[in-house]
Amino acid sequence: MSVRHRKSNSGSRAAGRSSRERPIAVVGVLGLLAMVMSFLPSARVSATPAQDGNPDLPQRCGLDMTIIIDRSGSIGSYNDEMADAANALIGGVSNTGSRVQVISFSSTATAVTLAGGVGSSSNISDLRLLPAEDVQLPAYNSSGGTNWDDALEMARRQPAVTPLTVVLTDGNPTYHNSGSGVNGHGNSLGGSGSYTSSNDINKAVAEADLLKAAGTHVLAVGIGGNLNTSNLSAISGDERLTSTNGMSFAEADWTTVGFAELKTLLEDFVKELCAPSLNITKTEIPLEGDERPGNSWEFELELGSAPAEWENPQQGAAETTATQTTVDGKANFKWEQGATATIGASVTEQARAGWTFESATCQRRNYDTGATSVLELTPQVGPDGSVSWVVPGGLGPADSVNCNVRNREVAPARIDVRKVTLPAGVAGEFDFALTGPGVDRQLADLGHGDTATFGEVPPGTYSVTEDDSTNFSLDSAVCDNTDTAPVETVDPAALVVGEGERWLCTFTNEAAPGSITVRKAAEGADGTFAFESDFAGDFELTTADGEASTVANAVQPGSYSVVELTPQRWTQVSATCSDGSAVGDIRVGPGEDVVCTFTNLAPNPTLGVTKSASVSSVDEPGDTVTFTVGITNTSVEPLEIDSLVDSVDGGAPLDVTALAVTDCDDLVGLTLAPGESTSCTFDLLVEGDAGDVVADVVTVSAHDSDDNVVEDSDGASVGIDDVTPRVEVTKTAGTASVAEPGAEVTFAVAVSNPGTEAFQVDSLTDSIAGGPAIDIATTGSVVKATTCGTVVGSSIEPGASADCTFTVEVSGAGGTT
């Protein structure tokens, strides 16, 4: 027999919900109950806890669930039916991403799903959630009483409760864990084991309330007719699933069914939960460590036509929706398909940086026939790394497609940049950019010899670029995979980077040449200055108006030096370069024009004067001497002669140009170039006494272009030679003869000075016939009269004379003289 049930539009929990017909085959002896349970409606997902404290079940496939199976003695010969029904529930969610944990109970609870698979353990901590496809329950032997309290406690005390807890029981509780509080597992038992006490119920209700408060939806399924339905309601809620109230499994708290119909009930439950749906189980394969569930991966499902509504994720009618995987690596899509027989579907996984698509396998399950089939997929990887595949054959209203998608963590590649400048070591700062799939990174301020990394990047095609840098031109840019040989020369603008590769991109830039200009500044005079350099060789600069300069000497960036060979007597005031570097270490940067200025101060003007006399001495009292004056400009600049003056023995200066005999007047106003000489002569009377040395000093004065006056002097000495006086005396007798025996004769005497100096007459004497000298300046026995006294003591100048007479008796024999 079969029936179809149309969901009622009445009822507070069912109002406004869509309906779906579910035919269920009904067999067994409990015909009426089977008829009630033969059709089970679906419902939209509700995340809002029900008013009775039992949270509504999310309307999606792939849920983790706890199955609590009664194996008390009252099960009797229905052990196989219980196992088959539980396996139908587990099989229905296999490969959907669901995990299950199974607890069996009689007088006490036992963990069935263990770390090693299906087994048996009384330790609460041994219970494990296992993938549904890995769980196949055997038939159980039933015995003992019924302890809901212990079974619910074991479920409640897990690290995290599951969204769904299904309790399958055929009788009322007859045991409970002793003790006044919860967590009584392992304590002695309370209860009779044969009838139900209030403690048996109350302890179970306390555990169930804690379990529901933790977020699980409890669905209590009473099997057979030997139980009190109020007890089922007490541990679950007040919303009963019947064939007439339009209740869905998502909202239902409890129901009853016969052993024969239990499997069909659970199959219908799974169908409502999972059809139609598409379920993703996401697995990550990391570089290190074990495989793990993939969290927060985004998937998009596009249907061939918009469903009436999306139940998960919740949204209105649209062809496309998207969701992300949970921490357990699950993503679920469920929709209200209505009567549409088949609808096309395609799945897209969004790319994630650092990961690559490994594989996708999908299985279709039809909940009407129970048939499963593996789908042949053709995944397509898009340019952005996303992966899409079409679900072959689409999905029917009773289908679920369950896909296992695996992504592998990509061994990251790395891209480094090395900077080289030509000439080597030239200072500069360079910036780089890396662009590629989801990557936009920068490196700043790299100099010659620096290597920096953009860090790890996923495989892909990248562009490494260098920002333009003033005064540098790109010479070459190549990339090399350092893990391989030989060295590659790949264009960094289109760098294809594979998984785990290490690339080094070398950018070589040539610096623009700079220049060095040497500038000469001469203060006080112009001059010629010699330099030695390692960029222009040896050279000279001759200033004009105090300035001179080389051309701009082109040089490669680097360090250079220039040295000035400072001329004698010049003072180097400063030697500086425009960029602040020293002249001995000129640091020329790329494209830099450096001007180095040498400033020198000229020496004070100097003059060299010489004077010489035409003779070294003259006879006393003196004579005219010709003097020669030599003038030399010993300065580094021209000098104009202003005057020539002479001084004799420190006497008053004489203007040489005004002397009677001179040609020195031609020199006044004459400009002498540096090192140039001239001369002139003049005559001057040099006088003095014998032995005197007459010092004659000439002083020449000149000035430079800045009106700085300079003088120099030189002297020439002329000696006065001692000269012996010269006397000429003439004597004339007043008569030529006298008569014998003799007579007085007057003699005239003339004393003259034919020499060059005056002399003084000391005495005048006369000798007669060779006799003794007679003073003729005074009268006596011989000299009878004389005027010569006036001559004695007088000074007679050169060329002068003095006359006198004296009278004496001349006697002798006749004929004598």
Image (cartoon, rainbow, N blue to C red):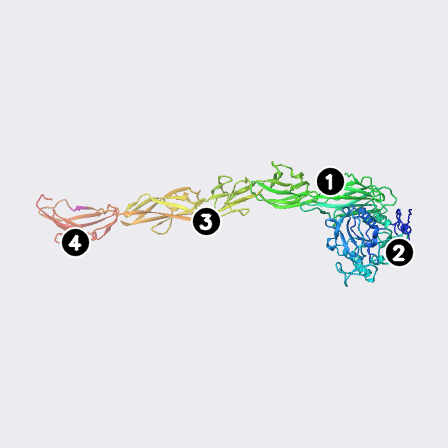
- One can see residue 214 in this view: no
Mark 4 or mark 1: whose residue is earlier in sequence: 1
Give the main secondary structure of the magenta stretch: strand
Nearer to us of marks 4 and 3 is: 3
**Magenta part of the protein: which range?**
730-734
Looking at the rendered structure, the secondary structure element under dot 4 is loop
Nearer to us of marks 3 and 2 is: 2
Q: Amino acid at mark 1?
A: Pro
Q: Position of residue 668 (x, y in %)?
A: 42, 45
Position of residue 20 in the picture relative to residue 420 (left or right): right
| Residue 740 drawn in magenta | no
**Label 4, on which residue?**
778
Q: Residue furthest bottom?
A: 180
**Label 1, on which residue?**
383
Q: Amino acid at mark 4?
A: Thr
Cα gap from disc 4 to disc 3, whole angstroms? 74 Å
Q: Nearer the viewer, residue 347 or 817?
A: 347
- Quarter of the rendering containing residue 300: top right
Position of residue 812 in the picture relative to residue 26 (left or right): left
Mark 1 or mark 3: whose residue is earlier in sequence: 1
**Label 2, on which residue?**
12
Looking at the rendered structure, the secondary structure element under dot 1 is loop
Cα gap from disc 2 to disc 4, whole angstroms? 194 Å
Mark 3 or mark 2: whose residue is earlier in sequence: 2
Looking at the rendered structure, the secondary structure element under dot 2 is loop
Mark 1 or mark 2: whose residue is earlier in sequence: 2
Cα gap from disc 4 to disc 1, whole angstroms? 160 Å
**Label 3, on which residue?**
708
Cα gap from disc 1 to disc 2, whole angstroms? 51 Å
Q: Nearer the viewer, residue 755 or 574?
A: 574
Q: Is residue 407 above or below residue 223?
A: above
